[in-house]
Amino acid sequence: MKKIYLVITAFLFVLGTALAQDNKSSVTVSGDSDDNTISVSQEQDDNETNVSDISVVDDSDRNDVDVDQDGENQLSTVNIEFGGNNEVDVDQDDKDNSSDVLIVDGNYNNVDVDQESDDNTSIVNITDVSDYNEVDVLQDGSGGHFSIVDIFAGGQGNEVDVEQQGKEQESNVFITFDSWDNDVDVYQEGEQNASFVSIDDASDDNDVDVNQSGEDNFSDVGVVIFSKDNDVDVTQDGDDNFSTVGVSLGSDGNNVDVTQDGDDLDSDVVIDDFSSENDIDVNQDGDNHESGVYIIGDSSYNDVEVSQYGNYSGSNVGVYDGSDSNSIEVIQK
């Protein structure tokens, strides 16, 4: 067992009034190296670039990684491969920053990404049978943020929280290729935000919650290709919001709840291609709503309930192409 205490601190400044300097830091912990502490601090002014690259690989466990970048155009990359119980904290303060975290065949790792200001990008990939990892992404400021969380290739028991503050933001969550029992929460506050969640390729028993507060927001959830027993909740609070949910290609036993509160709301739910025994609930509260539910292509034994409270709302339900024994209830008050 190797026990090394490693602290790396880099404070790099502009040298001279006319000379700009870019900072680069690279740290690698490998070969069954455990219980290390890695701290990278980079500070810049104006438009200089800070780059931090940290790799924890080859069965290196219980390491503590802290990246603190202050300034614009920052880039942080953290790779964890074949390691467990590592703690990663990335803090980027200012705009146009990018954080990339990759976990490959790693278990019980904790990742915390905090980005302030606007126009920041966060990418988190959890792959190759990586289990029970916890990821928190916070993007705060005026908006324009972009987030991707991708759990694929047999990842299970992972917990992901994405929070975005501001307007014109986008969150993407992908759970694919036999990834199961994952818990994903997306919270967006502001206007003109978009959330995309995709569960596919035999990914089962996942729990996804999307909460959007504000106006002109869009949520899209897809459960496809033999993905079963997933629980999806979408909540939109505000006016002019739009939600779409698709369950298709042999995806059975899923539970989808859509709740919308405000005026001028739209909800579309499509169940098709041999997808059966799904439970769909749509609740709209306010005026001028539209709800569409369509069951297509030998999709049977689905339970659909649409509730609309307010004035001038419309509900359309269609059952087509050999879809049998479905239960549909529409309530308008």
Image: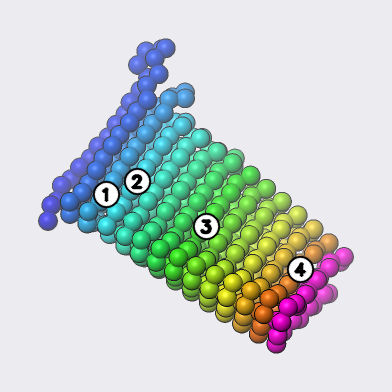
**Which residues, given as a range, are shown in magenta?**
307-333
Q: CA distance from mark 4 to mark 3?
A: 24 Å
Q: Local crowd at mark 3 within 10 Å, few (<14), some, or many (≥20)?
A: many
Amino acid type, residue under disc 4 in the picture: Gly
Label 4 vs 1, first from the N-terminus: 1
Q: How is the image coloured?
A: rainbow
Amino acid type, residue under disc 3 in the picture: Val
Amino acid type, residue under disc 1 in the picture: Val
Quarter where residue 327 is shown: bottom right
Q: Which residue corresponds to mark 4?
A: 292
Label 1 vs 3, first from the N-terminus: 1
Q: Which residue corresponds to mark 3?
A: 173
Q: CA distance from mark 2 to mark 3?
A: 19 Å
At x 22%, y 53%, the residue is 58
Q: Local crowd at mark 4 within 10 Å, few (<14), some, or many (≥20)?
A: some
Query: Nearest the camera: 68 or 156?
Result: 156
Q: Which residue corresponds to mark 2?
A: 78
Q: CA distance from mark 2 to mark 4?
A: 43 Å
At x 52%, y 66%, the residue is 200
**Residues at marks 1 and 2 touching, judged by CB atoms closer than 8 Å:** yes
Q: Quadrant of the N terminus?
A: bottom left
Q: Quadrant of the C terminus?
A: bottom right
| Image spot of residue 312 (x, y percent) | 87, 65
Label 2 vs 3, first from the N-terminus: 2
Q: Local crowd at mark 2 within 10 Å, few (<14), some, or many (≥20)?
A: many
